[in-house]
């Protein structure tokens, strides 16, 4: 299987310039830690990079017809936001149990939202794509999406060329695939370590076994990190096997503690999924290589009640 190249990631960086924020790398005074706050993106998460790149890479005819995606969270808003910038139609399939705040945020970006039972999201999106001649934009199983997410790693390498370790959250694997590809191409001496909730640690088990091992939805749904409940595709798993040096798993309590630390010490609002990589540094530092550590804070979209509950623990 042909993997995404650093050239594809550089092309993506050119396409997304002006549409995605080039987030800073924030050095912390309380630890040898640098934070990459993708929570500062206009939609609050890194997903805009991959969605925008995938839409920008379409030819004019296909792009003009519009796009369709399925998601209840950050990918939904990323596709809606990107489509709005291009002035094209977007249909987003969301589960009928999705939080109303996320549904309304997607609608506010101009997308048509279709609510279906959670197990019918992908099939409905593919059916709508065929019926309306729209282009399907998957959340991670796509070369242009991976390349777009890889621009996070490109920026890390440019801003901290002597980084020793890069921590990146694991779920469907698009972000880790892209970041890992960029870091290995530009900083070959740096270690790329995926971080996964132990309640959804299918990727850690799969990498140890050398093949994809699927966990049922009800197991992966247990973690508070709701953005890290997906499983890698064949495409992303092939990348992860190539670019990850290790995987660290963290508990939900460790994730909550990282949310609190990021809020109090770094003054960053991170959703549990966005705080997961930092949880590895805070709670498993002895398992990590030494040196300068970068943690990707992948997103900051969580409702006020959830944030208040975590901060008051």
Image (tube, grey):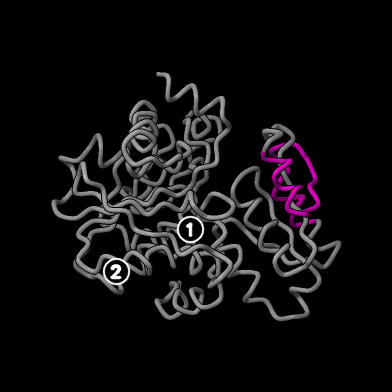
* Above-or-below relation of 175 to 273: below
Q: Residue 133 has which mark?
A: none
Residue 226 position, x and y percent, is 52, 36
Q: Residues within 10 Å of mark 2 (few under 14, many from 20)?
A: some
- In the drawing, does residue 46 fall left or right of residue 133? left
**Residue ID at (37%, 30%):** 260
Question: Is 113 part of what is drawn in magenta?
Answer: yes
Residue drawn at 29 percent across, 43 percent down: 248
**Mark-to-mark CA distance, 1 and 2:** 15 Å
Q: Position of residue 258 (x, y in %)?
A: 35, 34
Other residues around mark 1 within 10 Å, as few (<14) / some (14–19) / many (≥20):
many
User: At x 48% / y 30%, what residue is drawn?
Assistant: 224
220 or 101, which lies in front?
Answer: 101
Q: Nearer the viewer, residue 170 or 273?
A: 273
In this view, 211 is above or below 105: below
**Secondary structure at numbered mark 2:** helix
Q: Residue at x 26, y 47 (%)?
A: 28
Q: Indicate whether residue 87 is drawn in magenta.
A: no
- Vertical comparison of 257 with 50: above or below: above
Q: Which mark is residue 184?
A: 2
Question: Element type at marker 1?
Answer: helix
Query: Earlier along the polypeptide chain: callout 1 or callout 2?
Result: 1
- Horizontal side of 291 relative to 195 (left or right) equals left
Please provide percent x and percent y for residue 223.
47, 31
Image: magenta residue range: 102-127
Residue 108, image x, y percentages: 75, 48
Q: Are marks 1 and 2 in contact (CB under 8 Å)?
A: no
Residue 59 vertical position relative to residue 36 in the rendered view, above or below: below
Return the residue at label 1.
Answer: 174
Q: Is residue 301 left or right of residue 30?
A: right
Q: Nearer the viewer, residue 88 or 114?
A: 88
């Amino acid at each position: 299987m042909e993997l995404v190249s650093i050239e594809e990631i550089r092309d993506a960086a050119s396409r997304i310039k002006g549409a995605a924020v080039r987030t800073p790398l924030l050095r912390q005074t309380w630890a040898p830690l640098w934070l990459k706050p993708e929570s500062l993106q206009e939609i609050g998460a890194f997903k805009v990079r991959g969605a925008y790149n995938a839409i920008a890479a379409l030819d004019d005819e296909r792009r003009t017809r519009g796009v369709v995606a399925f998601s209840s969270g950050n990918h939904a808003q990323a596709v809606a936001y990107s489509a709005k910038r291009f002035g094209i139609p977007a249909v987003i399939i969301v589960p009928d149990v999705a939080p109303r705040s996320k549904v309304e945020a997607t609608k506010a970006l101009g997308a048509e939202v279709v609510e279906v039972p959670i197990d019918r999201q992908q099939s409905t999106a593919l059916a709508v794509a065929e019926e309306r001649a729209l282009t399907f934009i998957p959340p991670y199983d796509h070369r242009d999406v991976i390349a777009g997410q890889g621009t996070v790693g490109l920026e890390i390498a440019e801003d901290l060329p002597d980084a020793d370790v890069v921590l990146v959250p694991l779920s469907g694997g698009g972000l880790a695939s892209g970041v890992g590809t960029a870091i290995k191409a530009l900083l070959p001496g740096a270690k790329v370590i995926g971080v996964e909730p132990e309640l959804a640690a299918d990727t850690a088990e799969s990498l140890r076994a050398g093949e994809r091992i699927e966990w049922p939805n009800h197991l992966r749904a247990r973690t508070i990190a709701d953005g890290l409940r997906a499983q890698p595709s064949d495409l992303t798993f092939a990348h992860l096997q190539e670019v990850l040096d290790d995987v660290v798993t963290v508990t939900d309590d460790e994730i909550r503690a990282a949310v609190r630390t990021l809020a109090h010490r770094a003054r960053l609002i991170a959703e549990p999924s966005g705080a997961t990589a930092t949880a590895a540094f805070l709670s498993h530092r002895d398992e990590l290589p030494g040196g300068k550590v970068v943690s990707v804070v992948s997103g900051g979209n969580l409702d006020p009640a959830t944030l208040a509950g975590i901060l008051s623990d």
